[in-house]
């Protein structure tokens, strides 16, 4: 089949004239295909799905009741643009109550249709061709992808056990530092589960001021913190002068599909984000914003979700340790990041985490997410579907049985 006439017109940022001809398969698509095959080939053994990265429960009934009431109000039918006051004020109340961070709701908070679009739009506020975004690896790639779209470059900061899974800001070459405009952080970190110390945040603020860099902190997992009380980058002295924090209603409020989040912090950066957003979308449905506001005003919702995932994480860590994995409770998130096995006793060897992950899903219907960005690691998520604690225990028992039978080598 010949190429369409517009094949040569595709932008270089997505592959140019070669767009659609690359046979490389995105990691998560490869996992999805392997899951489908495992279910088809071995329906009798069922799938142990630790690859899911989304909450397994619906939004709380109280939030759904608000949505049910608001959806029928004619005043909610129109464009929301840059958000309604109800949501911004609720976000500001949440930030003060949970973190002691004082924000002006009108000028320092702006909603986004989930946090993902925020990471796509913020580079548009700062990046020109040749500019650099500093990002941790492994990490969420969206801000880096859009930095490249604008002609910028990405400098990766590996998260390794040797540096306690914190980015080494002192390792950045001078020529890179001179062109850097953005530093994208994520705490609690996805996928490593590391939480930031107040000392690290203070160092990051000083680093940003010394090098004229803006910090964007991804706080999607902010409320799922185990080793300390939930914290905000913006509670660090001076942080409000150097950046913004991006929050999500997904992880901490069981509102994955509702697509609600917010950007908060320095008012000039929030304003720039709002200007870009004005030219990108027309805002989330107002009824969704009002339901999200109700969720933010209920401190029990994130507390209960945090304790649920803490319980599940403790069970998973104990199970994997029994099976030879080198792991411990993460600081936060619902992800467990653990060194990948190197092979099976008397069986195949794995030259990467991806190879190990594919073996586990294909041969034993155990789904994980591989990371080979800074060493070979597997990510287990505790968002598997389980109706109650006995169901959780049954999944752990089945996991232990399958993994123990494998005799993995580390």
Image (cartoon, grey):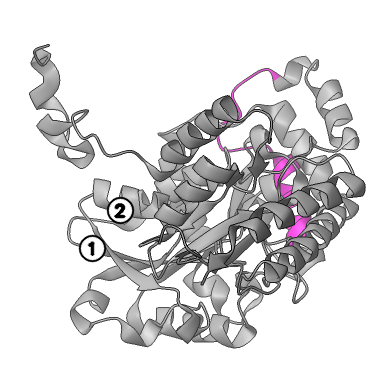
Q: Is residue 58 left or right of residue 359?
A: right
Q: Nearer the viewer, residue 35 or 134?
A: 35
Q: Nearer the viewer, residue 317 or 95?
A: 317
Estimate how packed mark 1 is, as few (under 14), some (14 to 19) or many (20 or more) residues with alpha carbons within 10 Å. many
Q: Do the residues under discs 1 and 2 have CB atoms within 8 angstroms?
A: yes
Residue at numbered disc 2:
147
Q: Earlier in the sequence, mark 1 or mark 2?
A: 1
Figure quadrant of residue 127: bottom left
If the image is split into quadrants, where does the N terminus sit? top left
Residue at numbered disc 1:
131
Figure quadrant of residue 396: bottom right
Q: Is residue 330 left or right of residue 136?
A: right
Q: Which range is magenta?
A: 77-95
In the image, residue 89 lies at what x, y percent? 74, 49
Q: Is residue 33 left or right of residue 152?
A: right
Q: Nearer the viewer, residue 26 or 315?
A: 315
């Amino acid at each position: 089949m010949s190429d369409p006439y517009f094949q040569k017109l595709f932008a270089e940022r997505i592959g140019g004239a070669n767009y659609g001809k690359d046979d490389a398969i995105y990691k998560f698509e490869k996992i999805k295909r392997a899951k489908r095959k495992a279910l088809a080939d071995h329906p009798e053994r069922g799938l142990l799905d630790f690859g899911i990265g989304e909450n397994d429960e619906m939004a709380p009934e109280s939030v759904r009741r608000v949505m049910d009431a608001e959806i029928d109000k004619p005043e909610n039918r129109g464009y929301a643009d840059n958000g309604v006051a109800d949501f911004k004020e609720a976000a500001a109340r949440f930030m003060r109550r949970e973190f002691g961070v004082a924000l002006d709701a009108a000028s320092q908070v702006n909603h986004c249709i989930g946090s993902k679009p925020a990471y796509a739009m913020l580079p548009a506020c700062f990046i020109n061709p040749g500019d650099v975004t500093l990002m941790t690896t492994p990490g969420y790639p969206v801000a880096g992808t859009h930095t490249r779209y604008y002609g910028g470059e990405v400098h990766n900061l590996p998260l390794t056990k040797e540096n306690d899974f914190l980015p080494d800001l002192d390792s950045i070459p001078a020529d890179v530092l001179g062109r850097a405009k953005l530093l994208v952080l994520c705490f609690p970190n996805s996928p490593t589960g590391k939480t930031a110390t107040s000392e690290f945040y203070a160092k990051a603020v000083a680093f940003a001021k010394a090098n004229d860099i803006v910090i964007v902190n991804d706080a999607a997992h902010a409320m799922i913190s185990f080793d300390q009380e939930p914290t905000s980058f913006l509670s660090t002295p001076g942080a409000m002068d150097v950046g913004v924090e991006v929050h999500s209603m997904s992880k901490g409020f069981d509102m994955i599909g509702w697509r609600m989040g917010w950007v908060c912090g320095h008012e000039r950066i929030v304003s720039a984000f709002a200007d870009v957003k004005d030219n990108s979308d027309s805002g989330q449905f107002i009824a969704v914003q009002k339901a999200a506001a109700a969720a933010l005003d209920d401190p029990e919702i994130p507390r209960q979700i945090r304790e649920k995932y803490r319980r599940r994480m403790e069970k998973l860590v104990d199970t994997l340790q029994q099976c030879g994995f080198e792991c411990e409770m993460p600081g936060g998130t619902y992800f467990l990041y653990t060194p990948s096995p190197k092979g099976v006793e008397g069986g195949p060897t794995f030259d990467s985490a991806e190879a190990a992950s594919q073996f586990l899903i294909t041969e034993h219907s155990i789904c994980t997410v591989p990371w080979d960005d800074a060493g070979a690691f597997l990510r287990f998520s505790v968002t598997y579907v389980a109706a109650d604690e006995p169901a959780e225990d049954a999944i752990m028992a089945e996991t232990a049985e399958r993994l123990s039978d494998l005799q993995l080598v580390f």
